[in-house]
Image (spheres, rainbow, N blue to C red):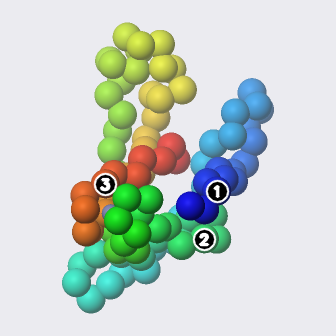
Amino acid sequence: MAEWRHRGSVSRNGYTVGMDFQEIPQQDGSIDVIAGGKRLVCVVCGGTHFHERNSLLNTRAATFFRFDWANKEAANFICAQCGYIFWFMT
Ligand SMILES: [Zn+2]
């Protein structure tokens, strides 16, 4: 299995967050996703078609669990083949 490397910009407090996403629409309504210059491939089924969903992470839960870093917007890419959800901080 390919090594997963998260390439992103380093913010002031040292956390690595954010990545460039490129979405290529497909005829069936799904998208191909290029993440950080590499094609996103499902780690479960190997599929390359996804559906996108932008979510706002649950602020109350984030506060409860002291995940203050999670109190922001996230990008979800849902595998069109098996339903596995990729979840990225944006
Ligand atoms: Zn999949």
* Residue type, label 2: Lys
Total numbered labels: 3
Residue shown at 37% from the left, 72% from the top: 47
Mark toward the viewer: 2 or 3: 3
Helix, strand or loop at mark 3: loop
Q: Quadrant of the N terminus?
A: bottom right
Residue holding disc 2: 38
**Residue situated in front as seen by the camera: 37 or 18:** 37
**For the residue labelled by badge 1, is the local secondary structure a helix, a strand or a loop?**
loop
Tag shown at residue 3: 1
Question: Would residue 71 appear left or right of 20 to someone viewing this image?
Answer: left
Residue at point 34%, 39% (across, down)? 56
Residue 16 percent location from the top left of the image: 69, 40
Q: Residue furthest bottom?
A: 27
Q: Is residue 63 above or below residue 70?
A: above
Q: If you read the primary sequence from the N terminus, does the residue marked by circle 3 or circle 1 appear first?
A: 1
Q: Residue at x 36, y 24 (%)?
A: 59
Q: CA distance from mark 3 to mark 1?
A: 18 Å
Residue located beneath label 3 in the image: 84
Q: Label 3 amino acid? A: Tyr
